[in-house]
Amino acid sequence: MFALVFFLPFIWMVATSLKPGAEVFSTPPSLVGSEIRWANYADVWTYVPFGQYMLVSFLVAVLGTLLVVTTSLASAYAFSRLKFRGRDSIFFVYLGTLMVPQEVVVIPMYLFMMQLGWVDSIQALIVPWAFTAFGTFLLRQALMTVPRELEDAAKIDGANHFKILTRIMIPMVLPSMAVLIVFTFIGYWNSFLWPLIIVNSPQNTTVPLGLNMFIGQGGGQWQLIMAAATISMIPTAALAILLQRYLIRGISLSGMGGR
């Protein structure tokens, strides 16, 4: 019953996407319109360049996720398996950045992007958020559960840190990596504030910004907005389903152990 309650907004969104435009705000409200208009989903791609928005969002989300996983995995390995002066202090300071909200850093980040000449560019949508303390913490906790004996055995066989990380550590922490991949992809895909500030041109517009393009001076095409929102959920839902086996295990185990 609770699942149904949380699922109701999704049901209403899909139902609204299939209504005629004149019946979206009908009184009294009805879940189903007088006809099912599948043409709304075709109109989404012609009313605005929605395909371009999807392509940009997909590119940003994929590249951003790859960069976040790479940097988080490298830093998590350093903080969990390497010994150097001030390791724990540096980690706790890095972890403290989680308490800084995005709204606080967008202005200095925008000024930094201006100095780099990256305003209104794809890299400006990706790079500033590619170094996350959340991913480092998540993978660090997972790496700390890997028995030290496996690492010692690999060192005896002549393996360096890169081989230990890629051949031993990564296969052991795949569930936690799946959690990070899904959360990061969704974060990039749904990001609205930063693209709103840094993007000026239509060719770099992402899906969250593109949904606003269905609202004009004559009012909003709400049936098209709901259809576009439904389409925009497909990549994130597909990724969650694809990684479901690792995702459920990763959520249940991440951060539960350590030494």
Image (cartoon, rainbow, N blue to C red):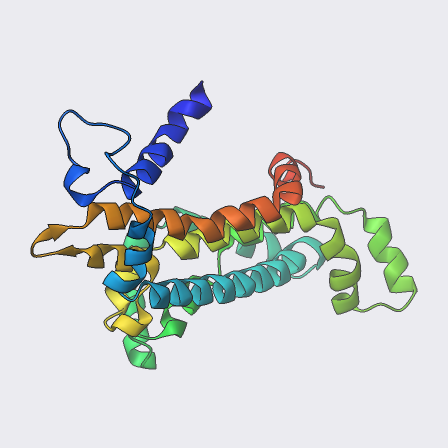
Q: Nearer the viewer, residue 142 or 229?
A: 229
User: What residue occupies the far front of the structure in this picture?
Assistant: 35
Confirm whether residue 92 shows in the render.
no
Q: Residue at x 27, y 69 (%)?
A: 199
- Location of residue 18 with respect to 151 vertically, above or below: above
The image shows residue 241 at horizontal and vertical percentages of: 58, 44
Q: Residue at x 31, y 61 (%)?
A: 45
Residue 56 left/right relative to 49: right
The image shows residue 77 at horizontal and vertical percentages of: 67, 58
The image shows residue 26 at horizontal and vertical percentages of: 15, 32
Residue 224 left/right relative to 160: left
Q: Nearer the viewer, residue 232 or 197?
A: 232
User: What residue occupies the far right of the structure in this picture?
Assistant: 157
Q: Residue at x 25, y 40 (%)?
A: 19
- Name the image quarter holding the N terminus: top left
- Name the image quarter holding the C terminus: top right
Q: Nearer the viewer, residue 256 or 93?
A: 256
Residue 140 left/right relative to 172: left
Confirm whether residue 195 shows in the render.
yes
User: What residue occupies the far left of the structure in this picture?
Assistant: 217
The image shows residue 194 at horizontal and vertical percentages of: 30, 60
> Number of marks in the image?
0
- Location of residue 177 with respect to 65 vertically, above or below: above
Q: Residue at x 60, y 60 (%)?
A: 75
- Location of residue 168 with respect to 19 vertically, above or below: below
